[in-house]
Amino acid sequence: MLGLILGLSILIGFGIYEYYSSRNYRRQIPTIIHVNGTRGKSSVTRLVAAGLRAAGYKVIAKTTGSAAILIYENGREAPIARYTAPNIKEQVNIIKFAARRQVDFLVLECMAVTPEYQWVVEHKIVNSDIGVITNSRLDHLDVMGPGLKNVTLSLCNTIPKQGKLFTAEKKTLPLLEKVAKDRKTKVKAVDNSTVSDELINKFSYIEHKDNVALALAVCQELGVKQEQALRGMYAMQADVGAAEIFPIKIGEKPAYFAHSFAANDPESTFILIDIILQRYKDIKDIILVLNTREDRIFRSKQIVDSLLDFDFAELILIGQQVKTIEKYAIRKGLNKKISSLGWVSGDQLENYLQNNIKERSLIFGIGNIGGNGGEILEYFKVRTR
Protein backbone atom coordinates (compact mmCIF):
# COMPACT_ATOMS: atom_id res chain seq x y z
CA MET A 1 0.00 0.00 0.00
CA LEU A 2 2.84 2.38 0.92
CA GLY A 3 4.47 1.66 -2.44
CA LEU A 4 1.23 2.44 -4.26
CA ILE A 5 0.83 5.75 -2.42
CA LEU A 6 4.46 6.64 -3.11
CA GLY A 7 4.09 5.79 -6.79
CA LEU A 8 0.90 7.82 -7.10
CA SER A 9 2.54 10.78 -5.36
CA ILE A 10 5.48 10.66 -7.77
CA LEU A 11 3.09 10.50 -10.72
CA ILE A 12 1.07 13.48 -9.49
CA GLY A 13 4.26 15.42 -8.74
CA PHE A 14 5.58 14.73 -12.23
CA GLY A 15 2.29 15.89 -13.74
CA ILE A 16 2.42 19.16 -11.79
CA TYR A 17 6.04 19.69 -12.85
CA GLU A 18 5.15 19.06 -16.50
CA TYR A 19 2.23 21.51 -16.34
CA TYR A 20 4.24 24.40 -14.90
CA SER A 21 7.19 23.62 -17.11
CA SER A 22 4.98 23.83 -20.21
CA ARG A 23 3.53 27.15 -19.01
CA ASN A 24 7.04 28.51 -18.64
CA TYR A 25 7.93 27.50 -22.20
CA ARG A 26 4.68 29.05 -23.43
CA ARG A 27 5.60 32.41 -21.88
CA GLN A 28 8.82 32.42 -23.90
CA ILE A 29 6.94 32.54 -27.22
CA PRO A 30 5.76 36.09 -28.05
CA THR A 31 2.81 35.07 -30.24
CA ILE A 32 1.00 31.81 -30.94
CA ILE A 33 -1.60 31.51 -33.70
CA HIS A 34 -3.99 28.57 -33.25
CA VAL A 35 -5.85 27.51 -36.42
CA ASN A 36 -9.09 25.54 -36.17
CA GLY A 37 -12.11 24.94 -38.42
CA THR A 38 -13.74 22.24 -40.50
CA ARG A 39 -11.72 22.76 -43.67
CA GLY A 40 -8.59 24.64 -44.63
CA LYS A 41 -6.74 24.39 -41.30
CA SER A 42 -3.54 22.97 -42.77
CA SER A 43 -3.54 25.41 -45.68
CA VAL A 44 -4.11 28.46 -43.50
CA THR A 45 -1.42 27.32 -41.07
CA ARG A 46 1.06 27.04 -43.93
CA LEU A 47 -0.02 30.31 -45.55
CA VAL A 48 0.26 32.34 -42.34
CA ALA A 49 3.68 30.89 -41.53
CA ALA A 50 4.94 31.51 -45.09
CA GLY A 51 3.69 35.10 -45.05
CA LEU A 52 5.39 35.84 -41.74
CA ARG A 53 8.62 34.16 -42.83
CA ALA A 54 8.70 36.36 -45.92
CA ALA A 55 8.89 39.38 -43.62
CA GLY A 56 11.99 38.00 -41.95
CA TYR A 57 10.43 36.63 -38.78
CA LYS A 58 11.50 33.39 -37.10
CA VAL A 59 8.47 31.15 -37.49
CA ILE A 60 7.80 27.53 -36.71
CA ALA A 61 4.56 25.89 -37.83
CA LYS A 62 2.96 22.51 -37.35
CA THR A 63 0.18 20.93 -39.36
CA THR A 64 -1.81 17.86 -38.39
CA GLY A 65 -4.17 17.37 -41.34
CA SER A 66 -3.36 14.80 -44.00
CA ALA A 67 0.07 14.42 -42.38
CA ALA A 68 1.65 15.72 -39.19
CA ILE A 69 4.41 18.05 -40.39
CA LEU A 70 6.84 20.34 -38.59
CA ILE A 71 7.84 23.38 -40.67
CA TYR A 72 11.10 25.01 -39.62
CA GLU A 73 12.13 28.68 -39.73
CA ASN A 74 13.61 28.32 -43.23
CA GLY A 75 10.55 26.52 -44.61
CA ARG A 76 12.14 23.08 -44.47
CA GLU A 77 9.69 20.36 -43.49
CA ALA A 78 9.95 17.15 -41.51
CA PRO A 79 7.26 14.56 -40.74
CA ILE A 80 6.41 14.11 -37.07
CA ALA A 81 6.94 10.50 -36.08
CA ARG A 82 4.03 8.95 -34.21
CA TYR A 83 4.45 5.56 -32.61
CA THR A 84 0.97 5.58 -31.04
CA ALA A 85 -2.34 7.27 -31.79
CA PRO A 86 -2.21 11.10 -32.05
CA ASN A 87 -1.99 12.67 -28.59
CA ILE A 88 -2.55 16.32 -27.65
CA LYS A 89 0.70 16.19 -25.65
CA GLU A 90 2.30 16.60 -29.07
CA GLN A 91 1.43 20.31 -28.85
CA VAL A 92 3.27 20.58 -25.52
CA ASN A 93 6.42 19.21 -27.15
CA ILE A 94 6.15 21.61 -30.11
CA ILE A 95 5.77 24.61 -27.78
CA LYS A 96 8.85 23.50 -25.85
CA PHE A 97 10.78 23.04 -29.12
CA ALA A 98 9.74 26.47 -30.46
CA ALA A 99 10.55 28.25 -27.19
CA ARG A 100 14.06 26.81 -27.14
CA ARG A 101 14.62 28.10 -30.68
CA GLN A 102 13.47 31.59 -29.62
CA VAL A 103 10.93 32.02 -32.39
CA ASP A 104 8.89 35.15 -33.01
CA PHE A 105 5.76 33.21 -33.97
CA LEU A 106 4.41 29.70 -33.59
CA VAL A 107 1.56 28.70 -35.88
CA LEU A 108 -0.32 25.58 -34.80
CA GLU A 109 -3.09 23.66 -36.50
CA CYS A 110 -5.56 22.39 -33.91
CA MET A 111 -5.12 18.63 -33.64
CA ALA A 112 -8.10 17.88 -31.38
CA VAL A 113 -11.51 16.82 -32.70
CA THR A 114 -13.68 16.16 -29.65
CA PRO A 115 -15.07 19.30 -27.97
CA GLU A 116 -13.45 18.52 -24.61
CA TYR A 117 -9.99 18.06 -26.07
CA GLN A 118 -10.30 21.21 -28.19
CA TRP A 119 -10.96 23.21 -25.01
CA VAL A 120 -8.06 21.58 -23.15
CA VAL A 121 -5.61 22.15 -26.01
CA GLU A 122 -6.41 25.86 -26.23
CA HIS A 123 -6.96 26.85 -22.61
CA LYS A 124 -4.53 24.54 -20.82
CA ILE A 125 -1.74 24.13 -23.38
CA VAL A 126 -1.64 26.62 -26.26
CA ASN A 127 -3.19 29.79 -24.78
CA SER A 128 -3.07 31.46 -28.17
CA ASP A 129 -2.90 35.19 -28.84
CA ILE A 130 -4.67 34.85 -32.19
CA GLY A 131 -7.30 32.26 -32.96
CA VAL A 132 -8.46 31.31 -36.45
CA ILE A 133 -11.66 29.44 -37.27
CA THR A 134 -11.61 28.90 -41.01
CA ASN A 135 -15.22 27.74 -41.38
CA SER A 136 -17.86 25.53 -39.76
CA ARG A 137 -19.31 22.69 -41.85
CA LEU A 138 -21.08 19.40 -41.30
CA ASP A 139 -18.24 17.01 -40.59
CA HIS A 140 -17.17 14.76 -37.69
CA LEU A 141 -20.82 14.70 -36.69
CA ASP A 142 -20.23 11.49 -34.75
CA VAL A 143 -18.20 13.43 -32.17
CA MET A 144 -19.09 17.09 -32.80
CA GLY A 145 -22.66 16.86 -34.09
CA PRO A 146 -25.46 16.28 -34.64
CA GLY A 147 -25.95 19.67 -36.30
CA LEU A 148 -24.11 22.75 -37.51
CA LYS A 149 -24.66 24.60 -34.24
CA ASN A 150 -23.03 21.74 -32.33
CA VAL A 151 -20.05 21.70 -34.69
CA THR A 152 -19.65 25.46 -34.32
CA LEU A 153 -19.81 25.34 -30.54
CA SER A 154 -17.16 22.64 -30.57
CA LEU A 155 -14.87 24.80 -32.72
CA CYS A 156 -15.52 27.73 -30.39
CA ASN A 157 -13.60 25.87 -27.72
CA THR A 158 -10.39 27.16 -29.29
CA ILE A 159 -11.40 30.84 -29.26
CA PRO A 160 -8.74 32.48 -27.06
CA LYS A 161 -9.40 34.60 -23.99
CA GLN A 162 -8.73 38.32 -24.38
CA GLY A 163 -7.24 37.74 -27.79
CA LYS A 164 -8.24 38.11 -31.43
CA LEU A 165 -10.25 35.78 -33.64
CA PHE A 166 -10.13 35.70 -37.44
CA THR A 167 -12.76 33.80 -39.39
CA ALA A 168 -14.18 33.48 -42.90
CA GLU A 169 -17.30 31.72 -41.56
CA LYS A 170 -20.56 33.49 -42.39
CA LYS A 171 -23.48 31.19 -41.56
CA THR A 172 -22.62 30.81 -37.90
CA LEU A 173 -20.73 34.09 -37.43
CA PRO A 174 -23.20 35.42 -34.81
CA LEU A 175 -22.55 32.37 -32.63
CA LEU A 176 -18.78 32.82 -32.96
CA GLU A 177 -19.14 36.47 -32.04
CA LYS A 178 -21.24 35.64 -28.99
CA VAL A 179 -18.69 33.19 -27.60
CA ALA A 180 -15.81 35.56 -28.43
CA LYS A 181 -17.54 38.40 -26.59
CA ASP A 182 -17.86 36.24 -23.48
CA ARG A 183 -14.09 35.67 -23.65
CA LYS A 184 -13.37 39.37 -24.27
CA THR A 185 -11.90 38.52 -27.66
CA LYS A 186 -12.19 40.76 -30.72
CA VAL A 187 -13.56 39.16 -33.91
CA LYS A 188 -12.30 39.98 -37.38
CA ALA A 189 -14.71 38.62 -40.02
CA VAL A 190 -12.75 38.22 -43.24
CA ASP A 191 -14.30 38.58 -46.70
CA ASN A 192 -12.67 36.86 -49.66
CA SER A 193 -13.64 39.66 -52.07
CA THR A 194 -10.19 41.09 -51.37
CA VAL A 195 -8.65 38.10 -53.19
CA SER A 196 -8.92 38.43 -56.98
CA ASP A 197 -8.98 35.61 -59.53
CA GLU A 198 -5.62 36.81 -60.81
CA LEU A 199 -4.12 36.57 -57.33
CA ILE A 200 -5.53 33.11 -56.55
CA ASN A 201 -4.57 31.63 -59.91
CA LYS A 202 -0.88 32.25 -59.21
CA PHE A 203 -0.82 29.38 -56.73
CA SER A 204 0.66 26.15 -58.10
CA TYR A 205 -2.25 24.14 -56.66
CA ILE A 206 -5.96 24.78 -56.13
CA GLU A 207 -6.17 27.18 -53.21
CA HIS A 208 -9.34 28.72 -51.79
CA LYS A 209 -9.90 32.46 -51.63
CA ASP A 210 -11.17 32.21 -48.04
CA ASN A 211 -7.91 30.59 -46.93
CA VAL A 212 -5.75 33.23 -48.57
CA ALA A 213 -7.93 36.09 -47.31
CA LEU A 214 -7.67 34.75 -43.75
CA ALA A 215 -3.89 34.31 -43.92
CA LEU A 216 -3.39 37.77 -45.40
CA ALA A 217 -5.58 39.32 -42.70
CA VAL A 218 -3.57 37.63 -39.93
CA CYS A 219 -0.27 38.69 -41.52
CA GLN A 220 -1.51 42.26 -41.91
CA GLU A 221 -2.57 42.29 -38.25
CA LEU A 222 1.02 41.34 -37.38
CA GLY A 223 2.53 44.08 -39.54
CA VAL A 224 3.27 42.25 -42.80
CA LYS A 225 2.22 43.92 -46.04
CA GLN A 226 0.15 41.94 -48.56
CA GLU A 227 2.76 41.99 -51.33
CA GLN A 228 5.43 40.70 -48.99
CA ALA A 229 3.20 38.00 -47.50
CA LEU A 230 2.11 36.80 -50.93
CA ARG A 231 5.70 36.30 -52.07
CA GLY A 232 6.15 33.84 -49.25
CA MET A 233 2.81 32.15 -49.86
CA TYR A 234 3.43 31.59 -53.56
CA ALA A 235 6.82 30.04 -52.83
CA MET A 236 5.69 27.72 -50.03
CA GLN A 237 5.24 23.97 -50.32
CA ALA A 238 1.58 22.93 -50.52
CA ASP A 239 0.11 20.57 -47.96
CA VAL A 240 0.18 16.88 -48.89
CA GLY A 241 -3.62 16.92 -49.07
CA ALA A 242 -3.91 20.11 -51.09
CA ALA A 243 -6.21 19.79 -54.08
CA GLU A 244 -4.51 19.65 -57.46
CA ILE A 245 -5.74 19.03 -60.98
CA PHE A 246 -3.74 16.98 -63.47
CA PRO A 247 -4.40 17.04 -67.22
CA ILE A 248 -3.96 13.41 -68.30
CA LYS A 249 -4.84 10.94 -71.04
CA ILE A 250 -6.83 7.79 -70.39
CA GLY A 251 -5.94 5.70 -73.41
CA GLU A 252 -6.23 8.28 -76.16
CA LYS A 253 -8.88 10.36 -74.42
CA PRO A 254 -7.90 13.71 -72.88
CA ALA A 255 -9.16 13.94 -69.29
CA TYR A 256 -8.50 15.55 -65.92
CA PHE A 257 -7.80 14.00 -62.54
CA ALA A 258 -8.47 16.04 -59.40
CA HIS A 259 -9.40 15.25 -55.81
CA SER A 260 -10.83 16.49 -52.54
CA PHE A 261 -9.59 13.48 -50.55
CA ALA A 262 -8.45 15.79 -47.75
CA ALA A 263 -11.58 17.99 -47.92
CA ASN A 264 -13.91 15.13 -47.22
CA ASP A 265 -17.14 16.81 -46.16
CA PRO A 266 -19.79 17.24 -48.90
CA GLU A 267 -19.96 21.05 -48.84
CA SER A 268 -16.20 21.43 -49.32
CA THR A 269 -16.21 18.80 -52.07
CA PHE A 270 -18.88 20.61 -54.08
CA ILE A 271 -17.13 23.97 -53.63
CA LEU A 272 -13.96 22.46 -55.08
CA ILE A 273 -15.76 20.85 -58.03
CA ASP A 274 -17.38 24.20 -58.81
CA ILE A 275 -13.98 25.93 -58.80
CA ILE A 276 -12.61 23.34 -61.24
CA LEU A 277 -15.61 23.60 -63.57
CA GLN A 278 -15.23 27.37 -63.69
CA ARG A 279 -11.56 27.07 -64.63
CA TYR A 280 -11.91 24.21 -67.14
CA LYS A 281 -14.89 24.93 -69.32
CA ASP A 282 -14.29 21.93 -71.61
CA ILE A 283 -15.17 19.30 -68.96
CA LYS A 284 -18.10 17.21 -70.20
CA ASP A 285 -18.64 14.51 -67.57
CA ILE A 286 -17.82 14.04 -63.90
CA ILE A 287 -16.82 10.60 -62.66
CA LEU A 288 -16.55 10.38 -58.88
CA VAL A 289 -14.08 7.99 -57.21
CA LEU A 290 -15.16 7.50 -53.60
CA ASN A 291 -12.51 6.00 -51.32
CA THR A 292 -14.23 4.01 -48.56
CA ARG A 293 -12.63 3.13 -45.22
CA GLU A 294 -13.84 0.72 -42.58
CA ASP A 295 -13.35 3.36 -39.88
CA ARG A 296 -15.14 6.08 -41.87
CA ILE A 297 -18.45 4.41 -42.79
CA PHE A 298 -20.46 7.34 -41.44
CA ARG A 299 -18.56 9.79 -43.64
CA SER A 300 -18.98 7.67 -46.77
CA LYS A 301 -22.73 7.45 -46.16
CA GLN A 302 -22.86 11.20 -45.59
CA ILE A 303 -21.21 11.76 -48.98
CA VAL A 304 -23.62 9.35 -50.70
CA ASP A 305 -26.56 11.28 -49.22
CA SER A 306 -25.18 14.50 -50.68
CA LEU A 307 -24.93 12.97 -54.17
CA LEU A 308 -28.63 12.18 -54.56
CA ASP A 309 -29.31 15.45 -56.40
CA PHE A 310 -25.86 16.00 -57.89
CA ASP A 311 -25.28 15.70 -61.63
CA PHE A 312 -22.49 13.23 -62.38
CA ALA A 313 -21.95 10.31 -64.78
CA GLU A 314 -20.69 7.51 -62.53
CA LEU A 315 -19.73 6.69 -58.95
CA ILE A 316 -16.72 4.38 -58.60
CA LEU A 317 -16.27 2.88 -55.15
CA ILE A 318 -12.77 1.90 -54.05
CA GLY A 319 -11.15 0.93 -50.76
CA GLN A 320 -12.30 -1.24 -47.90
CA GLN A 321 -16.10 -0.97 -47.72
CA VAL A 322 -17.34 -0.84 -51.30
CA LYS A 323 -20.14 -3.40 -50.93
CA THR A 324 -21.51 -1.76 -47.80
CA ILE A 325 -21.60 1.66 -49.43
CA GLU A 326 -22.97 0.30 -52.72
CA LYS A 327 -25.89 -1.30 -50.87
CA TYR A 328 -26.48 1.92 -48.97
CA ALA A 329 -26.44 4.03 -52.16
CA ILE A 330 -28.94 1.72 -53.88
CA ARG A 331 -31.18 1.71 -50.82
CA LYS A 332 -31.11 5.52 -50.75
CA GLY A 333 -32.20 5.60 -54.40
CA LEU A 334 -29.03 6.85 -56.05
CA ASN A 335 -30.02 6.39 -59.68
CA LYS A 336 -26.55 6.73 -61.20
CA LYS A 337 -24.13 4.10 -62.43
CA ILE A 338 -22.26 2.59 -59.47
CA SER A 339 -19.13 0.47 -59.88
CA SER A 340 -17.52 -1.30 -56.91
CA LEU A 341 -13.87 -1.97 -57.68
CA GLY A 342 -12.58 -2.65 -54.16
CA TRP A 343 -8.97 -1.87 -53.31
CA VAL A 344 -7.34 -0.95 -56.62
CA SER A 345 -3.97 0.17 -57.87
CA GLY A 346 -3.67 3.22 -60.10
CA ASP A 347 -3.11 0.95 -63.11
CA GLN A 348 -6.27 -1.02 -62.37
CA LEU A 349 -8.35 2.15 -62.03
CA GLU A 350 -6.95 3.54 -65.26
CA ASN A 351 -7.63 0.29 -67.13
CA TYR A 352 -11.24 0.39 -65.95
CA LEU A 353 -11.63 4.04 -66.98
CA GLN A 354 -10.36 3.45 -70.51
CA ASN A 355 -13.65 1.83 -71.49
CA ASN A 356 -15.93 3.95 -69.33
CA ILE A 357 -15.20 7.62 -69.90
CA LYS A 358 -15.77 10.21 -72.60
CA GLU A 359 -13.22 12.76 -73.72
CA ARG A 360 -12.65 15.67 -71.32
CA SER A 361 -14.09 13.86 -68.33
CA LEU A 362 -13.19 14.96 -64.82
CA ILE A 363 -12.15 12.02 -62.64
CA PHE A 364 -12.64 13.37 -59.15
CA GLY A 365 -11.44 11.61 -55.98
CA ILE A 366 -13.53 12.06 -52.84
CA GLY A 367 -13.93 10.46 -49.42
CA ASN A 368 -10.60 10.26 -47.62
CA ILE A 369 -6.89 10.48 -48.42
CA GLY A 370 -6.02 7.58 -46.10
CA GLY A 371 -5.62 4.07 -47.50
CA ASN A 372 -6.56 3.59 -51.15
CA GLY A 373 -7.16 7.31 -51.72
CA GLY A 374 -3.53 8.21 -51.05
CA GLU A 375 -2.35 5.41 -53.32
CA ILE A 376 -4.50 6.63 -56.23
CA LEU A 377 -3.44 10.25 -55.69
CA GLU A 378 0.25 9.33 -55.71
CA TYR A 379 -0.23 7.31 -58.90
CA PHE A 380 -1.63 10.28 -60.84
CA LYS A 381 0.96 12.65 -59.36
CA VAL A 382 3.81 10.44 -60.54
CA ARG A 383 2.10 9.82 -63.87
CA THR A 384 2.06 13.55 -64.71
CA ARG A 385 5.60 14.44 -63.61
Image (tube, grey):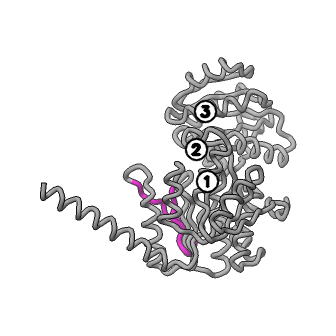
Which mark is first along the chain, 3 or 1?
1
Q: Is residue 127 visible?
A: yes
Instruction: Name the image quarter holding the N terminus.
Output: bottom left
Percent position (x, y) of residue 310? 78, 31
Residue in the foreground of this view, choosing between 208 and 164: 164
Q: What are the residue bounds of the magenta stretch?
A: 68-82
* Residue at which label 3 appears: 300
Task: Please tell me in which quadrant of the rendered image residue 372 appears.
Answer: top right
Q: Is residue 367 magenta?
A: no
User: Is residue 208 shown left or right of residue 29?
Assistant: right
Residue displayed at 64% across by 33% down: 302
- Nearer-the-camera pick, 111 or 14: 14
First of labels 2, 3 by sequence position: 2
Type of the residue with mark 1: Leu
Q: Which mark is residue 144?
A: 2
Determine the CA span between mark 2 and mark 3: 17 Å
Cβ atoms under marks 1 and 2 closer than 8 Å:
yes
